[in-house]
Image (spheres, rainbow, N blue to C red):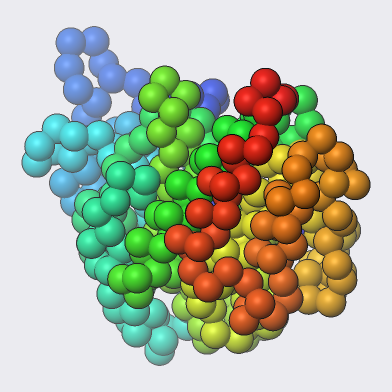
Amino acid sequence: MPDESGCGRWLRNRSGPPGQGAGSAAPAGGRPPVAATPAEKPRGTPGFALRPGQVFHHYRLQQQLGRGATATVYKAIDENNGSVVALKMLTLADDWPDDLLEDAKMRLLREADAAGGLAHPDIVEVRESGEHDGLVYLAMEYVEGVNLGMHAFEGKLLPPRMVTEMCARVADALYFAHQRGVIHRDIKPANIVFDQRNRRVRVMDFGVARLDNSRATRTGVILGSPSYMAPEQLDARPVTAQSDLFSLGVTLFQLLTGMLPFRSDSIPGLMQKISAEAHPPLRAVRPDLPESMSVIIDRALEKDPELRYRNGAEMAQSLRDCSRTIDPALR
């Protein structure tokens, strides 16, 4: 399976976050000091990493929560108001030549500004974005819960009715964003948070655009999570609301079955399957689910964007109609 590690895993209950080690503990009787030693590399250069205890801008870092190909996420305290945030540091210098780097930063910050205007109960808030000391950052609402990637494999699956209702809320959140011109581009279980105490679902990681013409794109590297991408996204064609709905269809299939609908040992093989081959029939894997669920997944996973749901609201309604036909006791 191709590697799909990401930076969306900044949840409080994940044990053993990477990067938590020497220098992260506070001395007795006081707050952690700003690290006296400089980082190993200058800020804004490839491979740069901050450390727990350091202050970046007006954020004091607590611990590293996740690290992926394009960003590192820290739990941090906003020293202006004492709130806890998830601080995402974007490593654009790793992927962009100097002559295009400034334009890439501006485009990403414009997208982050748009995402910051998404005031919706099921979307994680982007509170601030900007550039400081040569680094582009996003400060996001810190969310407690578990990402649904923890429930995307056999033995850990959630009840189908619960999955259907959660995905309906995600579809509604996507519709809200799409109406405001914001495409997510990376919908997958790990970017959906579930707080079991209040049964609330939150979509995270809005605000990071797929920037074309990067060094990785020009050399044929696919950024993001290819198993969840629509055919047009893999082919570098325009990404639309229907691209997000395809990704939600993949997510729904995986949360119901514990397996991805398209699998391969290589990226080229995976791209071929997503672009040209049919996914397994849902009821071949889960015969206990209603036929209406198969219809929803089949439509969401159409190769042609024009044949998918017209919008997230339409998909959400289909999911809610289907949910009423699922036995609530079904596991």
What residue is at 72 percent from the left and 40 percent from the top? 256
Q: Nearer the viewer, residue 257 or 312?
A: 312
What residue is at 35 percent from the left and 61 percent from the top? 176
Which percent across, then down, holds residue 214?
52, 81
Q: Taking 129 as reference, is 314 left or right?
A: right
What residue is at 62 percent from the left and 61 percent from the top? 247
Q: Taking 145 as reference, is 325 left or right?
A: right
Q: Which of 270 and 122 is in front in this view?
A: 122
Q: Quadrant of residue 186?
A: bottom right
Q: Please determine whether, in this image, residue 208 is positioned above or below residue 21.
A: below
Q: Taking 274 as reference, is 126 left or right?
A: left
Q: Nearer the viewer, residue 261 or 31?
A: 261
Q: Please determine whether, in this image, residue 257 is positioned above or below residue 265.
A: above
Quadrant where the image shows the C terminus: top right
Q: Nearer the viewer, residue 325 or 160?
A: 325
**Residue, far bottom:** 99
Which percent across, then down, holds residue 80?
9, 41
Q: Taking 170 as reference, is 248 left or right?
A: right
What residue is at 73 percent from the left and 76 percent from the top? 303
Q: Please determine whether, in this image, residue 8 is positioned above or below residue 222.
A: above
Q: Please determine whether, in this image, residue 95 is positioned above or below residue 279.
A: below
Which percent across, then down, holds residue 271?
79, 72
Residue 101 in sight from this viewpoint: yes
Residue 63 in sight from this viewpoint: no
Which percent across, then down, holds residue 234?
68, 76
**Residue, far top:** 28
For the image, the number of numbered tags is 0
